[in-house]
Image (cartoon, rainbow, N blue to C red):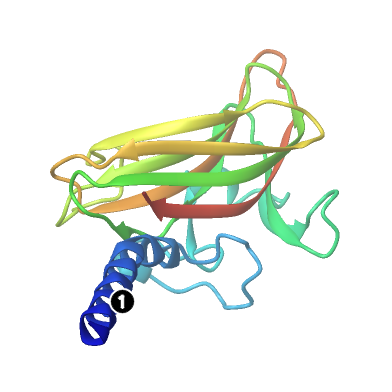
Amino acid sequence: MKRQALLLMMLAALVLVLGTAGTAAAAAGLDNGSFESEEPPRAKYQGWEDEYIFGWKPFAGSAWKNKEQEHVSVVACPSREGEKCLRLVGVEDNYVGIRSIHIPVEKKGFYTVSAKAFVKELGQPSRCQVWLEFWPADLPAETSTYRIAYHRANASALDVWQDLTVSAQAPDNAATATVLIIIHRTGNPQLPAEVYVDDVHFEAF
């Protein structure tokens, strides 16, 4: 009886480990979701554009990287003492943002992206969004032409940290996923757009 009980305990522990392994691996796959890393950006990581911040590459980079103002930066978080976060400042009639490294996913697996956002200024119809994107294997280029699917959440409330969550099932031809954080400054007249983002997580469920 004692031997049977011991075997049952070992089996239960093994099931628990296997059941949480996928979630842990997915969470670990997103580099620097807290924006606290001191690691330098990596050149041509995963074969495409250089990272702009460790773990993150520029999105629509040509629109804002050559501007005098720093449109994407890591700063001290407003109302969150002692923490760093991502700051995005809009460019007129264009996108400003960063995309995570590619994270391996299981076909038909379920995944969630969560983040916290603090909107300082965002005149309508400008918008701030967090996207969950899925990509195929053997990706020839990191463009919307080859993206299989995407899902997004919008930030809207001003001067308060809000939770953003996107959940989706990976398509049956998906090999990787990315997290995209953007603001789009638009409208007439051009209204200011400034947003802070922190605590970005990618998890299987």
From the top left corner, tell me how far across and down residue 197 is, in percent.
65, 47
Quarter assignment of residue 26: bottom left
Q: Nearer the viewer, residue 94 or 181?
A: 181
Query: Residue 62: in sight, yes or no?
Result: no
In the shown orientation, is residue 35 left or right of residue 119? left
The residue located at (66%, 68%) in the rendering is 36
Q: Which residue is mark 1?
A: 9
In the shown orientation, is residue 107 left or right of residue 149? left
Q: Nearer the viewer, residue 118 or 187?
A: 118
Query: Residue 34: in sight, yes or no?
Result: yes
Q: Quadrant of the N terminus?
A: bottom left
Kind of residue at disc 1: Met
The residue located at (25%, 51%) in the rendering is 141
From the top left corner, tell me how far across and down residue 188 is, in percent.
68, 13
Question: Which secondary structure lies at badge 1?
Answer: helix
From the top left corner, tell me how far across and down residue 24 is, in percent.
40, 66
Residue at the far top: name it. 188
In the depicted structure, whether residue 124 falls above or below residue 198: above
How many numbered dots are placed on residues in this image? 1
From the top left corner, tell me how far across and down residue 137 is, in percent.
16, 55
